[in-house]
Amino acid sequence: MPTLQVILNEHPHAGRDALIPVLQQVQEAQGFLSRGAITAIGRHLGLPASKVYGVATFYNQFRFQPLGTYHIQVCRGTACHVKGSLGTLESVQRLLAIRPGGTTKDGLFSLETVACLGACGLAPVVCVNGEFFAGMTPEGLRRLLDTFRKRGTAHDPGT
Amino acid sequence: MRIEINERPVEATQGETLLTAIRRAGVRVPTLCHMEGLPPTGACRLCVVEVEGQRGLIPSCSYPVYEGMKVRTHSPRAVRARHTIVELLLSNHPDDCLYCVRNGTCELRKLAEELGVHQRRFTGLSRASRVDVSGPALTREPSKCVLCGKCVRVCEEVQGVGAIDFIGRGSATKVGPAFDEALNLSSCVLCGQCVMACPTGALHEQSHVKQVLDALRNPEMMVVVQHAPAVSVTLAEAFGLPPGRDVDGKMVAALRRLGFHRVFDTAFSADLTVMEEASELVHRIQSRGTLPMMTSCSPAWIKFVEEFYPGFTGHLSTCKSPQQMLGAILKSHYAESRGLDPAKIYSVAVMPCTAKKFEAGRPEMIHDGVSDIDAVLTTRELAELIRMHGLDLEALPPEKADDPFGGRSSAGKLFGATGGVMEAAVRTAHYLLTGKEMDVLDAVEFRGLEGIKEARVRVGDLELGLAVASGLGNARALLEQIQGGRSDLHFIEVMSCPGGCIAGGGQIIGVDPGAITARMKALYDIDARSAVRVAHRNEGVRTLYDTFLGEPLGEASHRLLHTHYTPRHVIT
Ligand code: SF4
Ligand code: SF4
Ligand code: FES
């Protein structure tokens, strides 16, 4: 993965027009937009950090915390909604005490909502690190999180 | 070209906006996000009108006129739309208007009244948000923000700072510094121009009114006050008097009735600043020191350099600002010579400025726990105190400020307007370099509201390159030129607020732009009428040098009247 500096070097003399592509590339490379990255991007493009942060927070695609060991995507598409995905989302939020875009303090879990995972037959569906889990009721979800939590401590969280 | 507004013919010019034509026709269409002199954003939609042939309502602030256009500004549909917009703005607005600092000057309240909104039809989710009191001069109350974006625009487009911006989107949108951090970690320089732009109470100064009242009620304290040059030509407007009225004497009378034991004039120490600064300039030129020298009386400008151009701190004059010079003299020489304990003197400054509150709190301005200045009141806060005490400013017989720091030359008074410090300094630098007064004291090339004013002025056998920047955006432009290699300048004046202190961030809110010109004229009228127009002929200043300071740039001056600057690490 290219480093921040490499990405910035690919955009010499760039200005405001390049902001979104640069943000995307940096997030792609680093998994999220760190404070350091945001100020460096601003300096490179001649924009105040407040502008870069403002633009980035306008779009759902950007995150400001590193991904957790387990990245949970809760589908909020129509089919999943009808099958109760709001309840699923709310229970993740409650159980992990984070909001979409957030990462737990121990670095184990991060949360994101997506418009449609394209697996409507499995509604309400949750995707963890690319793996799909069907029919995720609040209760099923609690068990799923427990499984990961047990597995997670075996890993070194946050690395 | 001809257009028609409300069935009456109106002359319009190609390229102007419909709003401009409407206003010229004597019709008022309400606006919220519109800013004179900046390109329109069309964010608030309050200025909508009906244009024949157009299906939707048209935001007049961002729509150009065209030949034969037929406009109805107050059709039932347009009026209804505006009404609804205001209702929606109020739907999640806090209901604490009675306690709000903008009670009386709130544009939202005025709109509600004008549009006849008397009922709450919608109740939006109130936005729970923290009040940000982190800054040493400003407070943000995001729950009162109507997202008009004016503060964001002034900060970025006029001041070139960009400390704040919109964050997030949809109903969660808010305005704040980068990373939604507190203001004190941001690059905000506390100029207060956003406060002047804000239609509501979402942005305001940190009040020092209570501290000052406490000091005034404390029998152990001797409370002294100084007032800045731009205050006396603005204060009247807070009491409905026309802009440009100089109420110097009445204000002094009011300050005494408020209980201040001594009333001094910051224009006195502005004269002192001129003596030191002109001497410093001459010294830098003669000793091949760092040039161009840049003025240092505008604290937001100092913070700006420390944050954005730390390599330029050596260009800043080491002179403290007039506020701090007088503050330092009061707590040292003045206290000593009268046998007073400096800790028992409470020193207040009335300023047209919010950044002066920050300046007073700079560690360099505090010695052994005693601050040179204990509290800074804005012009607005002084007006509040005057009202609170039931004083009728207009009816008060004028009084004179106290000796020994009440007398001024009109050069010191000019500090209130952009170009004024330059004009005052040139008058004295000329005298210092040649031993003669200038033939013509008026330096008209430095007067007026232009962003950057420049002139080459002959002083003896020297030709000096002089420049004046009004507002931080223009100052940045000048700094960029110098960074790019420009080397013909000797001296640069910067005032952080466009127009200078007469348009400072602590001034009266909600006046029309013509008021700035009127205040400026008032200062130049004072200068034209004055018997003493150069700082070096201020008797009080001369006495201070003779009896205490010795020479400009001497040991005592160095200790009390000069300072230093340090790079600042903030989120830029
Ligand atoms: S005080 Fe000045 S620098 Fe700070 S946010 Fe307001 S406009 Fe920007
Ligand atoms: S803080 Fe004031 S000026 Fe800034 S967007 Fe909100 S209402 Fe407008
Ligand atoms: S004033 Fe025209 S859209 Fe706000």
Image: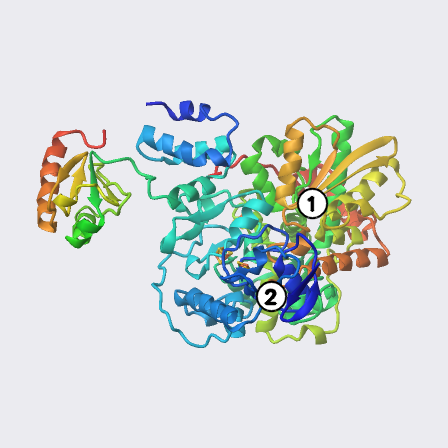
Q: Is residue B184 left or right of residue B472?
A: left
- Residue B539 % position (x, y): 81, 52
Image disc number at residue B451: 1
Q: Chain of mark 2?
A: B
Please tell me which residue lies in front, A124 or A88: A124
Q: Is residue A125 visible?
A: yes
Q: Chain of mark 1?
A: B
Residue at 29% over, 35% down: A66
Specify the quadrant of the image occupied by residue B317: top right
Residue at 60% over, 62% down: B509
The three-letter amino acid code for the residue at tag 2 is: Val
The three-letter amino acid code for the residue at tag 1 is: Gly
Q: Which quadrant, please, contains the N terminus of chain B?
A: bottom right
Up the image or down, B93 lies above or below B433; here it is below
- Residue B172 % position (x, y): 36, 54
Q: Which residue is mark 2?
A: B71
Mark 1 or mark 2, which has the lower sequence index? 2
Q: Secondary structure at mark 1?
A: loop
Q: Is residue B325 left or right of residue B365?
A: right
The answer to whether the residues at label 1 and label 2 have Cβ atoms under 8 Å apart is: no
